[in-house]
């Protein structure tokens, strides 16, 4: 019986998650091994795995993985270093929000890929332009999410702090930040996932190595096995980083679990 909002135990949740992956791979295998789709359009699981082994054994794919991870984390870190403080200021002080919010709301609808010609002109085809694509894709969304989180802090906590004699700066430091920190960390986790979706676009800019570059080259060769393996590797890295984020958040903000 499915009950709305009823929690699911950790063991049952793991079984359900693994079950979906098993079902997905079973359907994939049935479609490809059964000949319903030609191999040049969709490689079977075994061919995709063989392609991956070949990439690591003969094409130093670990270098591509390392470069891609560095680009994503680098662009995300820059976006977080600027976006989180700005979002906190916007959420805490309404005049600052009124000044920045219209432009940031406008900019967050602009696709990062549209900036590629300008980024090439401004920063060339080196690593700076790739980091900039990730930054643009993550920054504006993150600022608004943090501003909303801080701005919706419980008013009774703020009023109680004022009653106890807290200053304006003390309200931010002792009330708004501790109350918002778990949700800000969760927003960072979500935005990191979004940052990964921009890596293929970023590696269009003159990349010599990287998972996205490998996928682009494989597309030209109709090597769907390598394309699928690259996509799976990105998904695995994202899943691992997401899990690590959750663990760190739980350790840093144990009160958020209540």
Image (cartoon, rainbow, N blue to C red):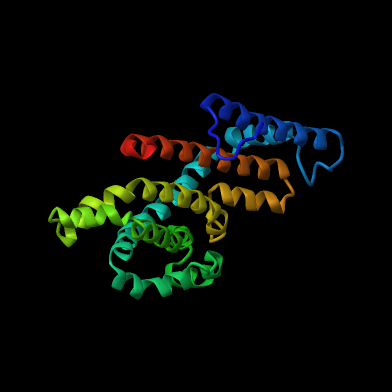
Most extreme residue toward the top is 11
Work out which quarter of the rendered image holds the N terminus and state it. Answer: top right
Residue occupying the point 69% across, 29% down: 22
Residue 103 found in image quarter: bottom left
Q: Is residue 144 above or below residue 177?
A: below
Most extreme residue toward the right is 35
Q: Nearer the viewer, residue 78 or 229?
A: 78
**Residue 63 location, x and y as percent?**
50, 41
**Residue 128 location, x and y as percent?**
42, 60
Q: Nearer the viewer, residue 7 or 229?
A: 7
Q: Nearer the viewer, residue 203 or 92?
A: 92
Residue occupying the point 57% across, 30% down: 13
**Relative to 29, is 85 on the left or the right?**
left
Residue 8 found in image quarter: top right
**Residue 11 location, x and y as percent?**
54, 24
Most extreme residue toward the left is 165
Q: Nearer the viewer, residue 43 or 143?
A: 143
Residue 56 found in image quarter: top right
**Residue 35 location, x and y as percent?**
87, 37
Say how many tags the image has. 0
Is residue 60 in view from this perspective? no
Is residue 203 in view from this perspective? yes
Residue occupying the point 56% across, 43% down: 234
**Relative to 80, is 202 on the left or the right?**
right
Work out which quarter of the rendered image holds the C terminus and state it. Answer: top left
């Amino acid at each position: 019986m499915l009950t709305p909002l009823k929690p699911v135990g950790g063991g049952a949740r793991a079984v359900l998650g693994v079950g979906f992956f098993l079902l997905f791979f079973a359907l994939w295998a049935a479609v490809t091994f059964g000949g319903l789709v030609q191999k040049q359009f969709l490689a079977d699981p075994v061919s995709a795995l063989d392609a991956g082994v070949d990439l690591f054994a003969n094409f130093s794919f670990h270098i591509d993985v390392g470069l891609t991870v560095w680009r994503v984390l680098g662009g995300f870190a820059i976006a977080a270093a600027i976006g989180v403080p700005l979002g906190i200021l916007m959420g805490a002080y309404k005049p600052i929000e009124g000044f920045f919010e219209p432009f940031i709301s406008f900019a967050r609808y602009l696709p990062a890929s549209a900036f590629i010609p300008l980024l090439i002109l401004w920063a060339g085809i080196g690593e700076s332009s790739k980091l900039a694509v990730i930054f643009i894709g993550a920054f504006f969304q993150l600022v608004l999410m943090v501003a909303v989180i801080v701005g919706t802090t419980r008013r009774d906590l703020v009023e109680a702090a004022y009653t106890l004699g807290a200053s304006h700066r003390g309200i931010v430091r002792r009330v708004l930040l501790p109350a918002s920190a778990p949700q800000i960390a969760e927003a960072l986790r979500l935005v990191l996932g979004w940052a990964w979706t921009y890596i293929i676009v970023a590696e269009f800019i003159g990349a010599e190595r990287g998972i996205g570059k490998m996928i682009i080259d494989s597309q030209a060769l109709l090597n769907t096995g390598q394309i699928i393996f690259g996509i799976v590797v990105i998904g695995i890295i994202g899943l691992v980083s997401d899990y690590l984020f959750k663990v760190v958040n739980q350790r840093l903000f144990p009160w958020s679990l209540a």
